[in-house]
Amino acid sequence: MRKIILASHGELSKGLLHSAKMIIGDLAGGITTFSLYPGEDAADYALELRKEIEANKEDEYVVIADLSGASVCSAMMPLTDYENVKLFTGLSLAMLLTLLTEYPGPLTESDVEELLKTGKDGIENVCLEVREEEDF
Amino acid sequence: MRKIILASHGELSKGLLHSAKMIIGDLAGGITTFSLYPGEDAADYALELRKEIEANKEDEYVVIADLSGASVCSAMMPLTDYENVKLFTGLSLAMLLTLLTEYPGPLTESDVEELLKTGKDGIENVCLEVREEEDF
């Protein structure tokens, strides 16, 4: 079974889950969010999560953190020592929706590459002119 | 003056703003969020925004939408006909923080490319092993 954890400074993680549920409903069920608030230490949550992972080694854990190199991501990084844990950064609605709808099974290396590409491709500068040209 | 609008299905936009404020405080002040809820039409908000843009043509509007090609982004796209409007997709904390802290003035084409790169580079698969190797 897969467990997804969205982890962020503040409420980005909660907001992302709300949006995903609005778009794909129950397919976004069972996701955990972690929001770091001022005065808290992300390492405390990472410790809790480590205990859960230790107790559920047959599950796949996909942790998606907000910012590469920032405190939430850094606290989660030691968890990637477990083979059943994958850690992504750059919380992205496109990536989350694709993960939920197109990759139900344990993620292979090529799945990971495809997911990263989906997230990156979703970041665009859009203007009407370009779109109209694409129609021709 | 620049006006930033974060626009999403559901509460991703609000969550993102909350996180940005937690990290950079007042630098994330004065940002507007739009959340589309079930039964609403993003075109109604786009119409309101069009009136505001018409009345403030000396301002720069930077709209960041959640998903390329989805209804919120599509409703905003006609606004890019105005020269003072830029529309990005893929709401990203990395991109928003960089916009707020490193690009105070009107965005040039190269600024836009740099911002897109910041957002894309922020989407990673992270593991402890890779990070340790980078330390050498």
Image (spheres, coloured by chain):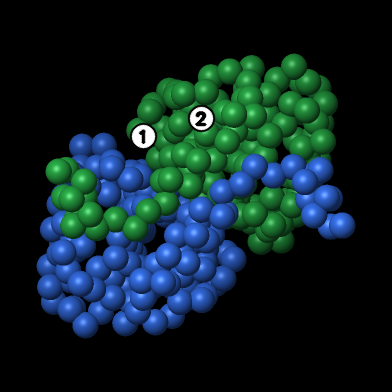
Chain colours: A blue, B green
- Residue A58 lies, in percent from the top left, at 21, 82
Q: Residue at x 12, y 73 (%)?
A: A54
Give the residue displayed 75% in from the left and 17% down from the top.
B58
Which kind of residue does numbered mark 2 sit on?
Answer: Leu
Side of A15 relative to B53 (left or right): left
Q: Quadrant of the C terminus of chain B?
A: top left
- The chain under label 1 reads B
Q: Position of residue A119 (x, y in %)?
A: 50, 57
Decide which of B21, B127 is in the foreground and name it.
B127
- Which quadrant would residue B57 be assigned to in this image? top right
Q: Is residue A17 visible?
A: no
Residue with the mark numbered 2: B99
| Residue B47 screen position, x and y as percent | 81, 40
Q: Chain of mark 2?
A: B
* Between B136 and A7, the one nearer to me in the picture: B136
**Which one is in front, A88 or A121?**
A121
Give the number of the disc on residue A25. none
Q: Nearer the viewer, mark 1 or mark 2?
A: 2
Structural crowding at the residue carrying mark 2, measured as other residues with C-alpha within 10 Å and reported as few (<14), some (14–19) or many (≥20): many
Q: Position of residue A115 (x, y in %)?
A: 46, 65
Mark pair 1, 2: CA separation: 16 Å
Kindly identify the amino acid type of the residue bearing the numbered disc 1: Met
Instruction: Look at mark 1 in the image and give the residue it sits on.
Output: B22
- The answer to whether any part of residue A110 appears in the image is yes
Secondary structure beneath dot 1 equals helix
